[in-house]
Image: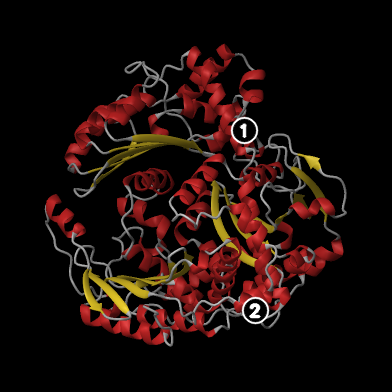
Amino acid sequence: EDNDLRILLVSDPESPEVACCMNVHVGATSDAQYNIQGLAHFQEHMLFLGTADYPEEDSFERFLSLNGGSSNAYTDAEDTVYYFTMESASKFSEGLKRFGSFFTNPLFTEAATGRELNAINSEHAKNIQSDSFRVYQLNKGRANGRHPFSRFFTGNYETLRDRVSTADLRQTLIQFHQDHYSSNQMSLAVVGPQSISQLEQMTRQAFSKVPNRLSTTPELQWKSERVYDAAAPSLLPSFGSIVEMIPVQPLRQLTLSFPICYGQQDERQQALYNKQADYITHLLGHEGPNSLLSYLKYQKDWAQSLGTASDNELSDLTTLDISIELTKDGLQHVDEILELVFGTLQLYRDQPMPNYVLTECVQLTDLEWRFATKGGASNYVQSLATNVEKYGAQCQHPEWIVAGPRRLAISEQLTSAPRNGGTQIMTQSQLQETQKLIQDLLRNYLTVDNALLTVMSPDLLKSGGGKFQKEKWYGTQYRVKSIPSATLQKWKTARAPPEIQYPTPNLFLPTEQGLKVKLPPKKNLSKAQKQSMSSKPPSIIRKDDRWTVHFKPDDRYGQPKAFCVVELYNSGQFYQDARTAALGMLYVTSVLDRLEESVYDARLVGLTYDLQLLPKGLRLSFGGYNEQLPQYIVEVIAQLKSGNLLPSTDQELDRYMDSLKRGLEGFDTKQPYAHASYYAYLTLQPMGFQIPNDEIRQASAKLTLQDLKSFSVWDRTDYIRGEALIQGNWNQAEALQLMKDMDDALRPLSFSS
């Protein structure tokens, strides 16, 4: 008999592993019902520690380790997600049964309950050093105090041990499980090489006994409360103020967060399918000419970078976030920067987005969807299970559960098959509907009166403006500053300067002709044949006194993409000592930053580049859709060689020096595993080139603009030889022509061998 458990099965005969994920629609916001903060997170931990069918606490982990597997879980605001993967497909059925018992008959033994409190507290102790957790908790403190989102989610000794006995905690865990762990509030995704019928049989055997307790969706309990409400009580003021905080890392950042609260379910579904916030984040986060970032960085020298995101926090809340990395001067001009942000939003209200911007956004997401690189089963199965929860109840087509989060302009096609073939162009009705939704979002939510503003920097300790307080759970130092009414009014009437405009059409979008594959992938290959194709080395297509060129065409993956790596070898001149290593880091930091604006459109389309100065020489890496890639490579090399990308003034140099300095200093407060990873990396470097962070930091502090301008990269005479690897959707003639074009672009570079 069915128990209303929502299940999505994926048969992938080529998958090298099997995976399963369960999304339980209950999370940390439901802690409030039991007045124990961290209860849902603790429940997540306890489910791994023995069931009636498999009572040994480490039974599941031992089974997975014997079969090349692993497991994990996480607790979100409204969902708890459990997953595991295995290399042994033959043992998948048993793995599913063991996993299914988590949701049927967990033990919650008193002994395990007491011990696992240590793990919860250790996890919280680790998170105390994380600025992301600190900012998240401060923003929750600005939420409506009557809404459970305002509470502390992870839990620690204080909330789970000191305020409740172990016996009572165990009973509450059992009650929580009985109240919320019901099959009608669960979504399961399974991926494996078995057939659909085989997967269905295994899944039914493993999960048919999960009880259906007819639980209601948890969010109904607080439906009447808005998450952020200026009229409701809150720990910190929500709107009309700026929260200043002292970070652990040497960050200098301004953040605007706009909460978008949905009053009705249809509003939420409309946002899921139309994704109107994505078009706005695309524009605000644009890094090309005439963008907000371009103005802040090159006209004002107030910002180093700018990022945007749209995050679905809760079933009735999405946030649109803007994060601006500030320069030292920018920290002194926060009000003016905010005026520019609000002025840019006003530009979008006054001048609706050109249709080509909307169409390009759809084309970009469609390109990414059509030619996505296949990832691991673990991440895939997690996305499927969470998407079943978000999309499954409103859409009967499994393909939309897969495609819905990744594609735009799908609202008109919910009852039809997903679009295939060529890249979709928006219909006129879609353009009109999207324009309307964007304007509604801009006018109703992206306003001065609905902005949560945060500034973080260690330098705030040296500034005036009142005493700092300590946040309860993470010990974050913060203070709240009210914004004068005159400043708020100035922001409300702000207008963008003429230098900030909509981006011009993107000329790097590939044509359908350019997306054709030259060598169709071979089908129905055995595992041995695939391994043979993968192990076949590239062939040498050029070898002379300048270059050795390796080439391998793609006849397996069938992607209209290509990649090129070029190395210029010398005898370690970029790593002679700490000073040259620091100069190399400063050089790469500055030229790649200046290059970014001119190549941003190409990067949006998926064309990539990288420059590295290594102990053995210089490495250039390129990749992306092959149609425009040769021209892109030559243009990037030309700009790198021109010398125009280096800073021209001490003020400009100071921005890059500051960025390098904070990046090096940030090492001190990283987690221990990051330190271990860094020192392991150093041991892999050639002897004599193992220059540690502290030596580079000391050397970088003494560098000058003249040092950087004298640092020779492209006109050196000590390069010994050149080597290149060209691979992907090209034939040999095209690969040779590309190498010739790159060689011409690099000249008069010469080799001394």
Looking at the image, residue 217 lies above or below residue 343? above
Q: Is residue 8 left or right of residue 539?
A: right
Q: Residues within 10 Å of mark 2 (few under 14, many from 20)?
A: some
At which x and y percent is residue 6?
34, 38
Q: Quadrant of the C terminus?
A: bottom left
Q: Is 727 displayed left or right of 251 in the figure?
A: left
Nearer to the camera, 660 or 207:
660
Could you say which is closer to the camera, residue 598 or residue 446? 598
Q: Is residue 208 visible?
A: no
Residue drawn at (52%, 41%) of the image: 673
The disc labelled 1 sits on which kind of residue? Ala
x%, y% of residue 745?
41, 85
Q: Residue 500: which disc?
A: 2
Q: Front-most of 517 and 77?
A: 517
Identify the disc placed on residue 125: 1
Choose the circle earlier in sequence order: 2 or 1: 1
Residue at 44% across / 28% down in the picture? Answer: 181
Q: Amino acid at mark 2?
A: Ile
Is disc 2 placed on a helix, strand or loop?
A: loop
Quick one: label 1, few (<14), some, or many (20+) residues within 10 Å? some
Percent position of residue 582, x then y: 59, 64
